[in-house]
Structure formats: C-alpha cells, structure tokens
Image (cartoon, rainbow, N blue to C red):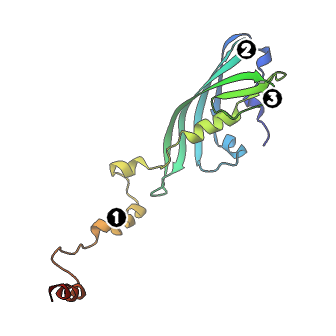
Amino acid sequence: MRNLAEFTIPFVGLKLGKHHFEYDIDNEFFDHFEYDDFNSADVKIDLLFEKKTTMMELTFQASGTVNVNCDITNEPYDQPIDSSLFLVIKFGDEFNDDDEDLLIIPHGEFEVNVQQYIYELIVLSLPLKRVHPGVEDGTLKSDVLDKLEELSIDKKEKKKEGDTDPRWDKLKNLLND
C-alpha cells in the first residue's frame, strides 16, 4: 500500500508549537485501504500537531457520519462518528509502532504519514453491532423485521403447563409402581 501524499506531514519545516491540519474523508480514502463496509463516508478529521524539541504530540478528532448497513435488517443508515486519538511520536534508532499510543521513528526522518491512524480511528469508532435507529425505537418498517417477528419464539404457541406428552405419563407410572 502506498502512502497518500496529502496525509504526509513534513515536520522538519515546522516551527516548534501547535499546528492545525484538517482532512475531509470520503469513500475514496477507504478504497485505498480496500475497505468496503461503508456505503458512503463524510468524516472530518481535525489534527492538532504539537511539535516539541524531542517529540511530537498528535491529537486526532474525528466527527461526521458513515453510511452502513444494519446488521439486523440490512437497511442502510447514517452512523454518527465522534472519536479521538492521542499519539506521541519520538525519535529512536529504528521504526517501531508496537505501542498504539507511541510511534518511534528513526532520527533521520523528516516527515510522518498519518493515514493509517486516521483509518483506524474511523473504523474502530464504529460499534460492533450496527443497529438502525428505527429498529431500536420501533419506527422502521421492513420485510426483514416482519419475518423475524413472525419466526420469533415468543409468537409460537406455548404449551400449557398441565399439558404433557402422553409418552411421559407412561414413564411416570413406572415410578409409582
């Protein structure tokens, strides 16, 4: 996977202090990662890049919506995204990204690419189970929901407590003999 140029920050030319970057994320960004779970995406990333003498601190703030399919009904809906990520970049002998909050880059580096962190921030901010808001409040009308309701265990006829299978009655008689 190649790096997208607009997500590369050349920090060598930046003065010490805080710098702001903004990114508008859409489906083209996710096509680059071959991620196709989103029908559409409209997410804004605000990046606060603070350069210090020995390290850099990055604070990502994601806000917007992604259009996904409901896990229950497969109906598309807009899932709001509101998430943040804090990352510290330090210099070391070799590249190391084992820690999710710390990135170590070699001393000779002059730029950092943030596309992977933006991708992970958005994808991991989605809930594990995606449920259409209309399913939760009961306003969504769908053929799938009607079929699920029809096949629900609660709707099937429950046997009365007194009704038992006659075969079990014969076995109960063995206990009395």
Is 38 on the left-hand or right-hand side of 115? left
Three-letter code for the amino acid on which mark 3 is drawn: Glu
Q: Quadrant for residue 5, please give it.
A: top right
Badge nearest the viewer, 3 or 1? 3
Three-letter code for the amino acid on which mark 1 is drawn: Glu
Nearest the viewer among 167 and 114 is 167
Q: Is residue 102 above or below residue 164?
A: above
Q: Are marks 2 and 1 in contact (CB under 8 Å)?
A: no
Is 35 on the left-hand or right-hand side of 10? left
Residue in view at x 17 percent, y 73 percent = 161
Residue in view at x 67 percent, y 43 percent = 30
Is 144 on the left-hand or right-hand side of 160? right
Residue 147, percent from left and from top? 38, 67
Q: Quadrant for residue 176, please give it.
A: bottom left
The residue under label 1 is 149
- Cα distance between the residues tagged 2 and 1: 61 Å
The residue under label 2 is 54
- Tag on residue 13? none
Residue 85, percent from left and from top? 58, 29
Badge nearest the viewer, 2 or 1? 2
- Tag on residue 94? 3
Q: Is residue 36 above or below residue 168?
A: above
- Cα distance between the residues tagged 2 and 3: 16 Å
Nearest the viewer among 165 and 114 is 165
Is 165 on the left-hand or right-hand side of 144? left
